[in-house]
Amino acid sequence: MRSVNNIKEEEMKEVMNAAERVVILERMRQASATFYRMAVRIGNHPFIEFTGLMNEYTKACERAHAEGIDFTQCNVHSGKELPLKGYEVAYINEKLGCIFTGRVLLSNTPPAKKKERA
C-alpha cells in the first residue's frame, strides 16, 4: 500500500483502493477535529462552521466508500459526483448560509453534464 502521508498531487489522480480510502477517511476526521479546535480558539463563528462542512463531506465520503464508490475521484475535474442525500444538501446549505450569508447554496439537482465535442 502506498503511504498516504506523502501523497503527491499526481498520485491523487490515481484511483485509491479500499484500504487506502479507509486510512484517508480517518485522516479526514483527524484533520477536521484539529481544525475545529483551532477555529474555536480563533473565535470567529462562521469560520468554525467550516468544520460542519468538512464533517458532512467526510460522512458522504464514508457512505460512498461503503457503497464501493471511490470518493477520491468524485469532483468537478473527473466529472464523477459524490452522492448526496437531500438532508445532506440541506445541512450543507445551512452551513454555507451561515458562512456566506446565503449567497452560496447547493442545488439538490446536480448540474447537467457537458456534452463532449465530436
Image (spheres, rainbow, N blue to C red):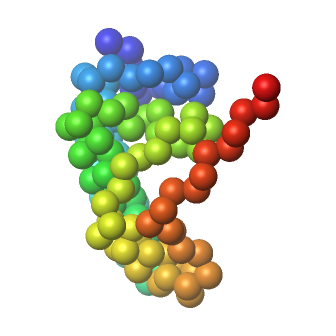
- The residue most toward the left is 66
Residue under the image location 29 percent in, 70 percent down? 87
- The residue most toward the bottom is 101
| Picture coordinates of residue 112, whole percent (x, y) | 60, 52
In the image, residue 78 sits, relative to residue 3, either above or below, namely below
Instruction: Note whether residue 37 is visible.
Output: no
Q: Would you say 2 lies left or right of 109 here?
A: left
| Picture coordinates of residue 48, whole percent (x, y) | 42, 74
- The residue most toward the right is 118
Residue under the image location 39 percent in, 37 percent down? 71
Quarter occupied by residue 51: bottom left
* Tag count: 0
| Picture coordinates of residue 106, whole percent (x, y) | 51, 68
Q: Would you say 66 lies left or right of 114 here?
A: left
Q: Would you say 30 lies left or right of 11 here?
A: left
Residue under the image location 31 percent in, 24 percent down? 20
Residue under the image location 57 percent in, 80 percent down? 100
Instruction: Note whether residue 13 is visible.
Output: yes
Q: Quadrant of the C terminus?
A: top right
| Picture coordinates of residue 74, whole percent (x, y) | 47, 40
Q: Would you say 79 lies left or right of 41 here?
A: right
Q: Quadrant of the N terminus?
A: top left
In the image, residue 108 sits, relative to residue 1, either above or below, namely below
Quarter occupied by residue 16: top left
- The residue most toward the top is 1
